[in-house]
Structure formats: structure tokens, C-alpha cells
Amino acid sequence: MEKQTEITTKEITFINDIDFRNILYDRLNEIDRVFTVNANYSTIFLSISTIEGIFKHVAEIFKEDIINSTNYLTTRKGKPFDKIPINELYTLLRDIEILPEIEGLEKIYKLFKDYRNFIHPQEQKKKAWAIDLGQAQMALGLLNSTLSFLSKNIFIGKDTYQKVAGSPDYDKDNVLHLKLDRTRLHSFLTTKSTVAESFSLSFDLELPAQSIFNFVFNFKNDGNFKMLRLDNRRNPKTPNCLLYCTQRYVWDTIMNFKDREPPSKTIFPVNIEIGKSKKLFRFIVDGKEYQLVDNQGKTSDLFAEFKPGLKVGFFNENRTVKLHNIESK
């Protein structure tokens, strides 16, 4: 049996359009095949056009931010948005911090924009540039490095989340799937930006029996954060609670919630509000604000646990958990 060698990175869950994602999978598999038979022209054309398509998809998500950016206003104003070349797309996405700032990288994208145009033989004749294995390897490397960086992200509306662990997936129906994975953190992601003054998040939580959902805050790294847990194992020993992670995969209970079990509904709304100036931290589940209580049953202020300037996020345990209709302010 012939063994297919995988040449390209296939982690493209940052693309939430399933039809477009499948088209990209087909192209990536095609690149795997043509590269292994030294089809250098095909490798370059497919690699660079795939990057262009991905850039255009991501740019459309952040179209408003791009159009209002200084670089766009000085170089692209009045020109069709869907005609932005690959090197300028890199610069514009870099300016809004979707892509990394690497000195000279826009020149590499520009170079391969020219190579990509060699699909027209007359364009290649004008440049008189050779195409061989070296250029094909460079184009393939540019594609893989682009995918590797973008694959660390999930775009939910205009918000960028970063993967900490696992393979969370945001689909075309605006559902975030927190899947089971090989680590105890399973599917873990955080906001790219930190919470300085205020944060507001709402979603409908699908929490199956025996599953656990954790809302993370004060996130420094995967071994230093606090989290609010909704625990659907419905065991007296595993109540809803506030926990503190002091090292990877180890966390201690600080305090329990007065409501020791989540709602029995299959799906229910969750609202989270944080405000530094108002000293506000509200965790509202199915319309009810959850209160922390100490061992004597005295209510404790949740805001006292919050530290500004750090990230928030979420992860699952035991079973897949889904977040529907995520909205933030």
C-alpha cells in the first residue's frame, strides 16, 4: 500500500467556514502530492494562492479594523478591498496584530506574489527567473509557517482567542466545541488581550451529564490561574466552586458556590461581568448570580479574587462541552 507523506500543516480550525476549510484541506493534500514528485511550479502556485485565500478570509473578519488602520488609509483607500495583494495583506494583518511582526517578511510575501503570477508564462518571461526545488521549498515553508502561526488562534466574531491546549473548534454555526484531548486541560483557550478595566461575556452553555466547564481568569500561564467551575458530575464531593491552579494540572479549591450544582437543563445562559472601577465580578448562570460561601456559609466577594491586566478563558473536563452564541463587549 502506498503511504502518503504529509508535507503541509493541516491544523486550520481557525477557519470556521466548513466549506472553505474543506477546500483548503483538498489543496493542502494536493500540495503534499505534487511536492513529493518535484512538481515545483505546482507547489509554488498552490502554496501561495492558498496563503492568499487564507489572508483574504481572515481580513474579511477584521475588515472594519483594517479599513480604519493608518496603513490602509495611506496605501489602499479608494481601492477594492478584495484586490489587496498578498504582501499588503500581510502588512495590514500585522498592523492589527493578527500576524507576527517579523522584519522583512513582507518582502518575502511580495517576492512570492511575483512567483505566483508566473502561472502566466509571459510574466515569467518578463522576470527571467528560474523555478526549481529551492523556490518550491521556500514557498512551502512560507505556507507552513503562516499556518503554524494562525493555527494558534480561534476567531470568535472580532475577538481573537489563543489555544493553550487541545483542539477547540469554532464552527460556521457559531458554536465553540471544547473537545476532549490527551491532556487534563483538554480544550483550553484564552483571550489574546488582557482584562484591564472591564469585560463582559455571554453565551449559552451546553453542559452534558458528567462534564465540567471552567471559566478561567487571572491567567498568567497554564500553571498559574484561577477558575470558576460548573461541575455536572452531581456528586456532593464535586460542587461548583472557585479553584486556584498553582502548577500544571494541579488546582486547589478556594471556596464553593452556594449553588452547588449547575442547572439541570441541557443548555442554559451564562453571563460574566467584570468591572475594575466598580469592583464588580458577576457570574450569572441561568439568570441567577452565583455567590461564593465560606465554611461558615458567609458570602464572599468574588471581585476580591480578580487581578487586572491578565487574561481570561475557559476549558472543559471529562466530556465535550459546547458554547453557543458567544458575545463579548
Image: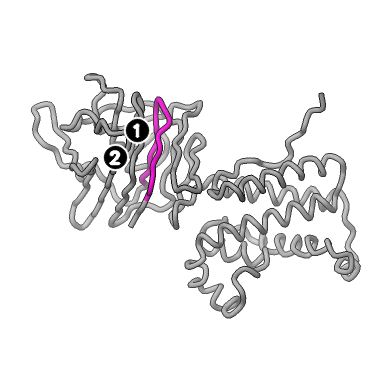
Rendered residue at 67%/55% (across/down): 51
Q: Which residue occupies the foreground of this view, 131 or 15? A: 15
Q: Which residue occupies the foreground of this view, 147 or 307? A: 147
The verdict on residue 89 being magenta is: no
Numbered disc total: 2
Do tag 1 and tag 2 residues touch (Cβ < 8 Å)?
A: yes
Question: Is 54 above or below relative to 314?
Answer: below
Residue pointed to by mark 1: 207
Quarter of the figure that contains the N terminus:
top right
Q: Amino acid at mark 2?
A: Phe
In percent of width and height, residue 14 lies at 54, 47
Quarter of the figure that contains the C terminus:
bottom left
The verdict on residue 322 being magenta is: yes
- Render colour scheme: one colour
Question: Is 210 above or below relative to 175?
Answer: above
- Magenta residues, as a range? 312-326
Q: Amino acid at mark 1?
A: Leu
Magenta stretch: helix, strand or loop mostly: strand
